[in-house]
Image (cartoon, grey):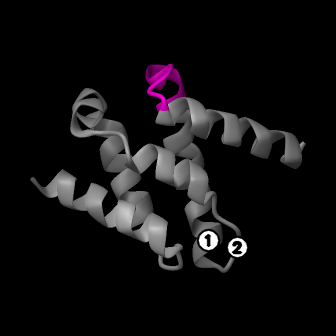
Amino acid sequence: MKGQRRRHEAGDARLITQDVALPWLLPLAVRHLRDTAPRQAAGGWYDDDLLYAVVTRGPPVWAQFPDLAHELQRAVETLDDLSRYVRGEVDAWKAMRRR
C-alpha cells in the first residue's frame, strides 16, 4: 500500500506542475506534506518532488487558496534537511508569501 501511495504522489506532483485539477490535488498534497513533515525532522524520507511541485505554483494559485498556503507555511518551517534545489524553491516561495 505504501508503494502504491508513492506512485500516486508522483502522479500528483506531475499534474500539479501542469496546474491540472489544483482545487482537488493541492489540498491533498499540502496535507500529505504537512503530515509527513514531522518524520523528515526525525530523519525520515520526505517527498521532495511533491514539495517542489507545490511550492513552484505561482502567486495567483496561492491567492485562491490562502488557508492552504498558511498550512504549507507551517509545514515547511519545520523542514531542515532539504536538497539544495528544493531548499531554493522553498525559500523563493516563502519570500513570495512575504510580499
Residue 36, x across and y down, in percent: 62, 58
Residue tagged 2: 44
Residue at left offset 40%, top offset 51%? 72
Disc 1 vs disc 2: Cβ atoms closer than 8 Å? yes
Report the amino acid beneath label 2: Gly
Residue at left offset 34%, top offset 56%? 73
- Does dot 2 land on a helix, a strand or a loop? loop
* 87 in the magenta segment: no
* Image-based side of 52 in relation to 41, left or right: left
Residue 16, x across and y down, in percent: 51, 33
Residue at left offset 50%, top offset 22%? 20
- For the question of whether residue 61 can be seen, the reply is yes
Residue tagged 1: 40
- Vertical arrangement, residue 8 with respect to residue 3, above or below: above
Q: What is the span of residues highlighted in magenta in the rendered image?
A: 18-26
Residue 65, x across and y down, in percent: 31, 31
Q: Decide: few, some or many residues near mark 2? Use Cα within 10 Å; few <14, some 14-19, many ≥20.
A: few
Residue 78 sits in quarter: bottom left
Residue 30, x across and y down, in percent: 49, 44
Closer to us: 27 or 16: 16
- For the question of whether residue 78 can be seen, the reply is no
- Does dot 1 land on a helix, a strand or a loop? helix
* Distance CA(mark 1)–CA(mark 2): 4 Å
Quadrant in the picture for the N terminus: top right
* Image-based side of 67 in relation to 14, left or right: left
Residue at left offset 61%, top offset 71%? 40
- Vertical arrangement, residue 79 with respect to residue 52, above or below: below
Closer to us: 13 or 79: 13
Q: Decide: few, some or many residues near mark 1? Use Cα within 10 Å; few <14, some 14-19, many ≥20.
A: some
Closer to us: 96 or 38: 96
Report the amino acid beneath label 1: Gln
